[in-house]
């Protein structure tokens, strides 16, 4: 949590304003009336008939059908020549500034007519306002979304350019981090066949889009003019989709099915509900759009709290990924609550909250990417564990028959011309041991024999349990004479385990059949069959011995039948 706060502190420090470089302002406002003129509004301001406010603090104007007049005055009163007036955070609607001669110029985030444009705020040069004795008249035009709080700053040109450049670097870095993490997740999702990464990518992309639209970065400097016509509806859709993706991501990433089953249905319901709200916001019927707009904020607040509680519950119950979710999600949740407090007037003085949300978005993308990497590693470990269980005999922990055959077939494809030997091993009189001492004793004997065989063989050799008391071993790069010595050593090792068969003093032994691979027309089934036949020949010859087959594939001519001498 400490490095989370350090990230937020570093990002906000990049935009920390130099207060000594700002010129103090007084401000007042009122709604626009039908017969208003700029001169009338300025006259009313001088008589104190407008609503006063502090331009350095965030102010939410009550926009009505015709908009709002705002008058700003430099302190101490005097000339504004050469100064830059900036509005931050930038309002989504259009703002006009009135010149001394009565003419006006306007700006908006999605305005592409100007040759130059500030980044992250609206700004005007006040070089022609020296005649107005330090007064600036603005008109906020009404808009569907022009209700966010704004603040005003008066800066020298050099200071303005410095802050503008710093903000551009900051915002670009934050959005670049979010986009990079989202694209990485989109690439990994099909590779791991895990939709969790796709939900994460959808959430991060939507959040990056929202921040890009609200800050104007997608318009300037990226120049996406085609977004201007769909800006309100696209932003509304992105907000709803981001919550839906976040809920679906949290359900899978935090393992709610296992660790928070009671909160899983509400989280899925939140995802579905926000999709319905998106549909309402995009509906052509005005009444439906308004109903959707009324539902957005309550669902955002309740949904954020729900996901936070669900993640905390899952984390407490033992979900490791849920801690990553909380570490990334809580800063956004706290900033959202803080921002709502600014809008509602319960807190004030935090103009940097809009920029902090950009930093929090980048932080969340990084933290959740680390969580996804941890999630992928856990998946890999789990898959490896499941693969081991699927490939190994549960009792003896050597390859089972299927896995052994697949391993040998892979070795044959890669073996080339190197000699390979196959040993087929069958424990002698194993049924007597089971009948006399019980199946538990038989299981212990199988485990002991498997361990003895594994320690005698090389790591590159493949040992498997073929069925019952039968084992098979593939000896890599081993000529027949050397394979015979290995088989004899295995016979002796098993016999020296001194596992009693019954009370008569007999000891468990093994009979081994040996067959060499005969490329290029030999097959695994034929090879195993030759080794199996050689093993039966060893049993018929007295057991506890090795028999090597020199048959040509299906032929059955034998050469050696070696009894093991203890």
Image (spheres, helix red, strand yellow):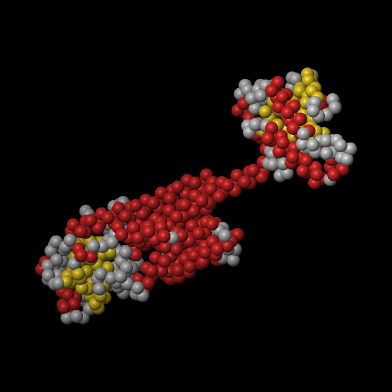
Residue 462, above or below 23:
above
Residue 183, above or below 48:
above
Residue 314, above or below 51:
above
Q: How many marks?
A: 0
Quarter occupied by the N terminus = bottom left
Expressed as whole percent of the image width and height from the top left, the position of residue 218 reads: 33, 54
Expressed as whole percent of the image width and height from the top left, the position of residue 340 reads: 38, 70
Is 325 placed left or right of 341 in the picture? Answer: right
Q: Residue at x 30, y 70 (%)?
A: 349
Is 390 placed left or right of 155 in the picture? Answer: right
Choose between 30 and 177: the one closer to the eye: 177
Farthest residue, direction left: 131
Choose between 15 and 522: the one closer to the eye: 15
Q: Residue at x 18, y 58 (%)?
A: 157
Expressed as whole percent of the image width and height from the top left, the position of residue 241 reads: 46, 59
Choose between 367 and 52: the one closer to the eye: 367
Quarter occupied by the C terminus = top right
Residue 292, above or below 556:
below
Q: Residue at x 49, y 65 (%)?
A: 308
Q: Is residue 361 visible?
A: no
Is 247 placed left or right of 517 in the picture? Answer: left
User: Quadrant location of residue 539?
Assistant: top right
Expressed as whole percent of the image width and height from the top left, the position of residue 542 reads: 85, 27
User: Quadrant location of residue 455?
Assistant: top right
């Amino acid at each position: 949590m400490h490095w989370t706060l350090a990230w937020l502190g570093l990002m906000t420090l990049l935009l920390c304003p130099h207060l000594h470089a700002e010129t103090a302002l007084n401000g007042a406002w009122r709604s626009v009336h039908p017969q208003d003129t700029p001169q009338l509004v300025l006259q009313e301001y001088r008589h104190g008939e407008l609503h006063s406010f502090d331009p350095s603090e965030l102010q939410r104007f009550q926009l009505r059908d015709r908009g709002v007049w705002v008058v700003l005055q430099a302190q101490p009163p005097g000339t504004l020549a050469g100064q830059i007036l900036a509005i931050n955070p930038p309002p989504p609607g259009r703002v006009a500034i009135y010149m001394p001669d009565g003419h006006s110029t306007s700006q908006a985030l999605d305005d592409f007519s100007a040759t130059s444009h500030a980044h992250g705020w609206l700004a005007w040069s006040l070089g022609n306002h020296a005649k107005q004795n330090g007064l600036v008249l603005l008109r906020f035009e009404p808009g569907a979304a022009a209700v966010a709080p704004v603040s005003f700053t008066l800066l020298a040109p050099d200071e303005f350019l410095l802050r503008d450049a710093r903000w551009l670097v900051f915002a670009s870095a934050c959005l670049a981090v979010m986009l990079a993490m989202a694209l990485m997740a989109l690439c990994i999702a099909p590779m791991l066949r895990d939709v969790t990464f796709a939900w994460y990518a959808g959430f991060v992309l939507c959040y990056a889009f929202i921040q890009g639209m609200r800050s104007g970065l997608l318009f300037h400097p990226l120049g996406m003019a085609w977004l201007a016509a769909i800006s309100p509806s696209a932003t509304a859709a992105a907000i709803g989709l981001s919550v839906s993706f976040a809920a679906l991501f949290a359900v899978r990433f935090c393992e709610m099915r296992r660790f928070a089953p009671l909160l899983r249905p509400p989280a899925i319901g939140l995802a579905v509900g926000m999709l319905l709200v998106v549909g309402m916001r995009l509906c052509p019927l005005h009444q439906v759009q308004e109903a959707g707009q009324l539902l957005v904020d309550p669902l955002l607040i309740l949904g954020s709290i729900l996901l936070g509680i669900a993640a905390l519950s899952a984390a407490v119950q033992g979900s490791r990924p849920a801690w990553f979710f909380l570490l990334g999600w809580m800063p956004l949740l706290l900033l959202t609550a803080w921002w709502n407090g600014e809008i509602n007037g319960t807190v004030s003085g935090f103009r940097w909250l809009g920029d902090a949300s950009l930093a929090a978005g980048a932080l969340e993308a990084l933290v959740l990417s680390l969580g996804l990497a941890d999630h992928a590693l856990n998946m890999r470990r789990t898959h490896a564990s499941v693969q081991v269980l699927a490939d190994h005999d549960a009792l003896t922990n050597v390859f089972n028959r299927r896995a052994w055959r697949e391993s040998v077939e892979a070795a044959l494809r890669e073996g080339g011309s190197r000699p390979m030997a196959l040993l087929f091993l069958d424990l002698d009189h194993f049924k007597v041991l089971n009948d006399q001492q019980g199946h538990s004793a038989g299981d212990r004997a199988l485990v002991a024999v498997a361990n003895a065989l594994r320690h005698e063989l090389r790591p590159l050799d493949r040992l498997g349990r073929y069925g019952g008391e039968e084992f098979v071993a593939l000896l890599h790069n081993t000529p027949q004479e050397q394979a015979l010595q290995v088989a004899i050593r295995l016979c002796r090792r098993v016999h020296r385990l001194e596992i009693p068969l019954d009370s008569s003093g007999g000891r468990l032994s093994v009979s081994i059949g040996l067959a060499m691979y005969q490329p290029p027309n030999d097959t695994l089934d034929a090879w195993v069959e030759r080794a199996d036949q050689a093993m039966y020949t060893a049993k018929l010859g007295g057991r506890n011995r090795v028999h090597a087959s020199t048959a040509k594939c299906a032929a059955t001519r034998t050469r050696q039948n070696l009894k093991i001498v203890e």
